[in-house]
Image: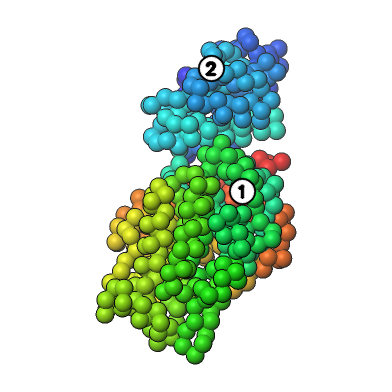
Amino acid sequence: MNGRTVTLAGGVLVAGAAALALALWSSSGGQSGASSSAPTATRSFPLSKPPRTIPSVRSATPAHGPGWRPGPDGRVVVGDDGLADEGRLLAGELKLHYAGHTDARAGDVELDLASGAGDGPESYTLRVRDGRVRIEGPAQAGVFYGTRTLKQEVHAGGTAPEGEVRDGPAKPVRGFMLDIARKPFTAGWLENLVRELGDLKYNELGLHLSDDQGFRIESATHPEVVSRDHLSKAQVQRLVALASARHISIVPEIDSPGHLGAVIGAHPELQLHGAGGRAPAGTVDIANPAAGRIVDDLLKEYARLFPGSKWHLGGDEYVPLMSSDPGTAYPALAAAAKRRYGGKARVQDLTAGWLNDRYATLHRAHRTAVRAWDDGFPADGVVHLDKAIQVAYWTGREPDERDPVDFLKEGRRVINYNDEFLYYILGQLHHFPYPTGRRIYQDWSPLVVRGTEPVPAKYDRQVLGATFAVWCDDANAQTEDQVAAGIRMPLRALVQRLWDPGKPPLSWNEFMALGQRLGD
């Protein structure tokens, strides 16, 4: 190809030359790129421009040629049978015929695996040349993301520009988390969400399954804790299959030892009692072995339902740790800590031990990528959370919370859930205004883990990525459709910054217009 490489610094560049090329070609009597006698790419066509997608591609080599768009005789073919699912999905979306493992011809889209096609399992190369498209990557995930780029390129009659794209994400964790415990969401809505996340190249969907207000998933081991309005296991299996086909890992969370009100409702004997008879809502007595047994039963049951290595332990807002003097406020916990861990142990040590025990249960179930909320990690003491547990850092408003740099200095891996930018709380309770895509796009980066200031760049590799979280504290404040509309541009802004954290070249207004066009 004749051309030059354009490296994109994190945004989407306006493209129009490919459409002009198609118009010039058509006016000279040509057909679309699906024609069996595709024209040769020559300098009679303008030099192409990078594709217009969200997230933007990171590197593009332009070329002279008409580009490609789906035609009536076009097919999707694969060079490896392991790409059959990706091929069938793309064929259905672009109204092409899926031809399976066979040679490509003009007008086709060819998917293949190639070890040198990218820098990681989620990278890919997309080449438009000689009236056909070839997408290849070192793994299925990268090829899938290449198909998402192509799908956006030809959206609403568009044309995939001639040339080559080499692309891949900067961050391995690109997540969205949904609180279905406080507000049940329908299975159909969740499935549409998965499709949207896949098209945007997200790779995680976190589900907050239980809280004080509800327990929203069928259970065989403890059916007594399940709320009336819940997802059946069959519905979950369909959701898992849909997510897997789009290379999205579902990250379940059974939050503990706080936020367990639904479990306590069925087992009041697990309720924690402190000095003066206080009984904080949703708070189990971690000195009671029965509490650990019930949570472990649930973890083991759902480890069989949700495949993969990822899990969220919770661990946030355990009420005793929010007390100025946990040992005085909860003397029974203080005594239990000393019995188990020695005379210097305190309530925070007993809490850390609880989370380590739950982690051990998950580890035996082959869950190796486990995270917990940052306020579940004690700053000092005789017991520390297992080094393998990732830090889900969310809160920066409380002055006594640990700084993210503390965790990074310890060598821990951190996932950014910064509540300043990435928390969408229904009803805007607790002084949390709804986050905007504009603010994420302009003022946030993956290194802005707490508040508005970034952590030092030397920790970039330890910050694995970020997750946008919807919390349903006021469940009736918005309908499902209103939630979908409210998170639409924040999701797009976030994935842009995770795919390429560099300064986006598009203005916010240009980016928003692109998001609206691609959503038509």
Residue 293 appearing in the image: yes
**Quick one: which residue is furthest to the top in this view?**
37
Mark number for residue 486?
none
Which of the 4 image quadrants contains residue 333? bottom left
Q: Does the CB distance between marks 2 and 1 fall below 8 Å?
A: no
Q: Nearer the viewer, residue 228 or 323?
A: 228
x and y percent of residue 499 in the render?
48, 44
Q: Amino acid at mark 2?
A: His
Taking the spot 41% from the left edge, 74% from the top edge, the residue there is 287
Front position among marks 2 and 1: 1
Taking the spot 72% from the left edge, 65% from the top edge, the residue there is 476
Q: Nearer the viewer, residue 352 or 290?
A: 290
Residue 495 appearing in the image: no
Q: Secondary structure at mark 2?
A: strand
For label 2, count other residues whose C-alpha is less than 10 Å away and answer few (under 14), some (14-19) or many (20+).
some
x and y percent of residue 128 in the render?
54, 22
Query: Which quadrant would the C terminus be assigned to in this image?
Result: top right
Which of the 4 image quadrants contains residue 37? top right
Q: Secondary structure at mark 1?
A: helix
Q: Is residue 363 left or right of residue 520?
A: left
Q: Nearer the viewer, residue 265 or 501?
A: 265
x and y percent of residue 436 in the render?
60, 59
Q: Amino acid at mark 1?
A: Lys
Taking the spot 50% from the left edge, 47% from the top edge, the residue there is 304
For label 1, count other residues whose C-alpha is less than 10 Å away and answer few (under 14), some (14-19) or many (20+).
some
Mark number for residue 101?
2
Q: Is residue 203 above or below residue 326?
A: above
Residues under labels 2 and 1: Cα distance? 35 Å
Which of the 4 image quadrants contains residue 416? bottom left
Mark number for residue 233?
1
Q: Is residue 202 above or below residue 18?
A: below
x and y percent of residue 358 in the render?
41, 60
